[in-house]
Image: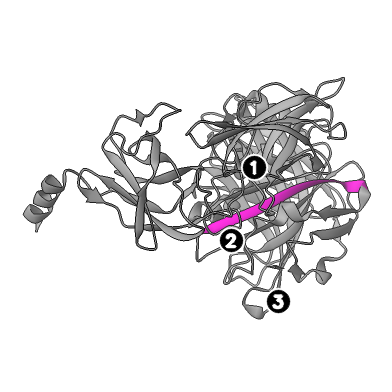
């Protein structure tokens, strides 16, 4: 058997190429096929991810002349018995960048051929895809690629993207939810890339994180990128308290005490989970991580960002170290555990090795992913003392974290279903007037492995926020079965954190947040 395998490799010229499940997507938006904007437009630049796709050293074609075969690799698009080759811009061992040939709207399949071997076909949808805007981090979200300086209201910004197709009219671009004037659309010959020149609306919000989305005439909505819009004092006057640390980089600590109230209707049976937890992370952030860290998704007040991608086991693991997921970066060692004291007693916030090391524990209530009937809730208004002896990278510290009254979501019971084409309004009371309320909506399509979410930043004192239809458009429809993954929720984040210091940290921040959520059906 081994001899036959070796002979097959030699005869075929190398290992068989393999396309990762869900590994074909618009090169800019990176939206999976299972989402509304997950189709690929003819003429658009797209990416194939997998293994043994190309040579060990990357091969790149001239931008104006992508080639049908590059570095020994070819990509074939088959539809209705007809096969066409895609032009190739770049070929690497685990990634191919190509341009979609002219094929009819509908389902098609992609095959990668290399050195006499062909991959298994991967299904895709062609046409009807949204325009994708390139992001600096290459992840489909974050700062807009090539926009390096803050723009002024009324100033010009040029976006790079792909997927407009030929003869596109009626393109709309929203900057902070306000329609911008599109002055010109240019196509970079043969590469599948377009440049859009637009004027920043004079009513756009001033912020370092102003979301930008593009909508095609057919209603398809792009991914979200952000730009900085500056006023007289720059763009950072109203930024969240951790934004500066995230952008400057360096070692940072974040301690979160979380009260979660979740109503789950998974399996047609409503279950209420009330859980108190602690999550602590110490991370070294790279310079300008604000372009890539999840925390940089917090948009300008009154606006929404979207994020979409494949749903994997790592998504669930991130829930176990929520503070680490917020920060991003590389984990730092702060010792064996962290003590937490309050009116309800003392507990240990244990070290976890699920994913990157962090510290987390359930303090009380009914655990979300457990079978326990629960124990008394731990958090109540008052002061909490957190202490640690330290470790090899972070020294001993003491933090005093206040907890205020709990925010109440007033119309939670009314929202069994959310119409993505109509938007949804949420109402609350009890949040501090200067706090930041985040409205989050998201879902995962287990069958296709695609997930989509939006995050909106509201003013707590307003008492309500309307999530617009464009922010919900790339959330999978229906309700995820088995786990509470189709969720609408509200976060109450204090306006100012508790500050603590430790050897090895540039800054430490501690807050108590409340999260009220429920499972919903997205229609």
**Residue under label 3:** 270
Range covered by the magenta-colored residues: 449-461
In the foreground, 83 or 92? 83
Graded by Cα atoms within 10 Å as few (under 14), some (14 to 19) or many (20 or more), the crowding at tag 1 reads some
User: Is 416 covered by the magenta stretch?
Assistant: no
Q: Nearer the viewer, mark 2 or mark 1?
A: 2
**Compared to 226, does 339 lie above or below?**
below
Q: Position of residue 318 (x, y in %)?
A: 57, 50
Q: Disc 1 designates what residue?
A: 326
| Distance from Cα at disc 3 to Cα at disc 1 | 29 Å
**Callout count:** 3
State the image coordinates of residue 506 (x, y, percent, origin top left).
Answer: 66, 24
Give the label on residue 444, or none.
2
Camera-nearest residue between 81 and 315: 81
Q: Secondary structure at mark 2?
A: strand
10 Å crowding of disc 3: few (<14), some (14-19), many (20+) = few
The residue lying furthest to the bottom in this view is 268
Q: Residue at x 51, y 43 (%)?
A: 44
State the separation of the CA atoms marked 2 and 1: 19 Å
Q: Determine the residue positioned at 67% across, 54% down.
A: 218
Q: Quadrant of residue 305?
A: top right
């Amino acid at each position: 058997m081994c001899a036959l395998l070796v002979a097959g490799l030699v005869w075929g010229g190398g290992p068989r190429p393999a396309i990762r499940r869900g590994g074909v997507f618009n090169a800019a938006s990176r939206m999976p096929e299972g989402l509304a904007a997950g189709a690929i437009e003819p003429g658009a630049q797209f990416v194939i991810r997998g293994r043994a796709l190309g040579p060990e050293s990357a091969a790149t074609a001239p931008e104006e002349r992508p080639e049908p075969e590059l570095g020994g690799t070819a990509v074939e698009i088959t539809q209705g018995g007809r096969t066409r080759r895609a032009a190739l811009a770049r070929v690497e061992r685990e990634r191919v960048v190509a341009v979609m040939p002219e094929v009819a709207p509908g389902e098609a399949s992609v095959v990668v051929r290399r050195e006499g071997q062909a991959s298994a076909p991967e299904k895709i949808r062609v046409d009807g895809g949204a325009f994708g805007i390139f992001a600096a981090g290459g992840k489909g979200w974050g700062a807009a690629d090539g926009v390096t300086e803050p723009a002024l209201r009324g100033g010009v910004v040029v976006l790079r993207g792909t997927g407009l197709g030929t003869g596109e009219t009626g393109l709309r671009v929203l900057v902070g939810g306000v329609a911008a004037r599109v002055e010109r659309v240019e196509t970079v010959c043969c590469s599948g890339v377009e440049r859009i020149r637009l004027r920043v609306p004079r009513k756009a919000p001033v912020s370092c994180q102003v979301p930008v989305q593009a909508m095609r005439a057919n209603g398809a909505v792009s991914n979200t990128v952000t730009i900085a819009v500056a006023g007289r004092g720059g763009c950072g006057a109203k930024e969240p308290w951790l934004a500066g640390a995230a952008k400057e980089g360096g070692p940072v600590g974040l301690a979160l005490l979380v009260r979660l109230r979740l109503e789950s209707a998974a399996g047609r049976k409503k279950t209420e989970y009330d859980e108190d937890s602690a999550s602590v992370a110490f991370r070294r952030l790279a310079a300008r991580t604000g372009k890539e860290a999840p925390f940089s998704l917090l948009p300008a007040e009154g606006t929404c960002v979207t994020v979409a991608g494949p749903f994997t086991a790592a998504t669930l693991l991130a829930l176990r170290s929520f503070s680490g997921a917020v920060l991003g970066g590389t984990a730092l060692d702060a010792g064996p555990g962290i003590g937490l004291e309050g009116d309800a007693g003392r507990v240990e916030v244990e070290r976890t090795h699920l994913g990157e090391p962090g510290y987390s524990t359930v303090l009380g209530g009914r655990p979300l992913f457990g079978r326990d009937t629960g124990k008394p809730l731990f958090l109540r208004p008052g002061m909490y003392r957190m202490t640690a002896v330290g470790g090899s990278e972070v020294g001993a510290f003491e933090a005093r974290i206040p907890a205020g009254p709990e925010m109440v979501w007033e119309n939670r019971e009314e929202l069994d279903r959310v119409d993505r084409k109509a938007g949804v309004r949420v109402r609350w009371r009890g949040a501090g007037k200067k706090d930041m309320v985040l409205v989050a909506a998201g879902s995962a399509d287990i069958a296709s492995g695609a997930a989509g979410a939006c995050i909106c930043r509201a003013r707590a004192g307003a008492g309500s926020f309307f999530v617009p239809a464009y922010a919900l458009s790339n959330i999978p429809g229906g309700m995820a079965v088995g786990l509470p993954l189709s969720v609408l929720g509200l976060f109450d984040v204090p306006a100012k954190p508790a500050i603590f210091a430790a050897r090895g940290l540039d800054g430490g921040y501690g807050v108590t947040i409340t999260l009220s959520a429920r499972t919903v059906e997205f229609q």
